[in-house]
Image (cartoon, rainbow, N blue to C red):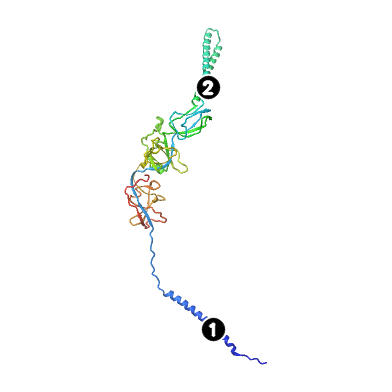
Amino acid sequence: MVFIVSEPAAEPSRRRSSVRWLWRLLVVLILAAGVGGFYALQKFKPRPAVRAPVRQLPLVRVDPARAGEGPLSVTGNGLVRARHEVVLGAEVSGRVVEVNPRLVAGGTLVRNEMIVRIDPAPFQAALAQARADRASARVALSLAQRNVKRTQELISQKFLSTQTLEERTAARDQAQATLARVQAQIDQRELDLARTEIRAPFDARVLSKRVNVGESVQPGRELGRIFAVDALEIAVSLTDRDLSLIADPWRGSLPDPAATRSPRKAPANGPEAGTSPATIVVEHGGARYRWPAVVDRVEAAVDSATRTFNVVVRVLEPRARGESIDAKSPSGPPLVVGMYATVEIAGRDQGAYVTIPRSALRDGGVVWTIDAASRLVANEVRVLSETDERVALDAAGLPAGARVVTSDLRVVTPGMQVRVVEEAASSGAGRAAGS
């Protein structure tokens, strides 16, 4: 057998292999051209000019320190309260037969006016019996005294022995003791009878009523509450810094050595010499009203929670209507127990000082100011007084007119330059921080 091999059959296979290699080469050339073009564009493209970053100075708001001179007022708040408040209570047992119609919350009573009457009949009967016992004791004593005298005469005539005289003398002494005991019973019965009527110890207003006609009461039961209308006061909580601004606030609180020789009289409704004047302000019906007052005393203990002093201010005209401040109402209300009031106390003369906004005072008693070159300067100051809006400072630590920073400063260093966005115009002499 003979095999015949044909060579032209291998030609198509070699041709297809060559075409594949040509396509691969073309792809490589295209990729190389793209990479080369991208590199050339990046290398020869024009570059923007490089500029230094602009420095942004912080913006701050300033306000001028305002000059002031003279006393600084101290402001506080408190509730109007009665200086004298009394709980009415029964001292004897019995049935209530009469109640004053003015014994109602808000009612008014005059001094020595009858408030509650307990049935006096049992006490009148007991008093009558005690008086009858006294008459009997007097008769017995008179008889015993005559027996002693007669016995002494008989002994002088030697008709009786000394022992008889001793027995009759003892009987006389016993009769005297019986009369004294009965007299004490009469005093007690008269006192019990007087206690069946409960009377007002002073001109008063009624806070509450807890009794009605027909009720049976026992000693110690509360029948109502009243307070004196001629003595009202307000306790104001002040810090030691504010207290130091008041001229001698301890005047009415410390014992007076001369009091042992001449006891101190209770203050009348008028200012005493040396007391600090004050003004009580109450807002009522959209208008404000004021009453004159004086600093009366400082309470004995410091508040353990707030570490403040309670300064008691006494109202000079507690029965008067308030004087209108805003001239909106010609007739103001009277002061009522429980009213919320603002108290302004006149302080001692502080000389020269400056006031700044409350927001300008930083922690540690530091105030930041702006110098002529718009740089920050730290100033350590001594605070004299402060309120929610302004702070009074010693003029030695900060000159009047200085531009104080009121903005919130997060990161700050002395000498840092800033930009001022607003500066309030100076208004000359400023008002006190407490005014």
Horizontally, residue 144 falls left or right of residue 56, namely: right
Question: Split into 4 quadrants, where in the image is the N terminus?
Answer: bottom right
Q: Quadrant of the C terminus?
A: top left
Q: Residue at x 45, y 77 (%)?
A: 37
**Mark 1 and mark 2: span between their CA atoms?**
148 Å
Q: Position of residue 204 (x, y in %)?
A: 44, 32
* Image coordinates for residue 92, horizontal then vertical, percent: 52, 27
Residue 347 in percent (x, y) is at: 37, 41
**Towards the viewer: 326 or 414:** 326
Q: Nearer the viewer, mark 1 or mark 2?
A: 2
Q: What numbered label is drawn on residue 103? A: none
Badge 2: residue crowd in 10 Å (few <14, some 14–19, many ≥20): few
Badge 1 amino acid: Val
Say left or right for 425 vs 151.
Answer: left
Q: Quadrant of residue 244?
A: top left
The residue identified by callout 1 is 19
Give the residue at mark 2: 125
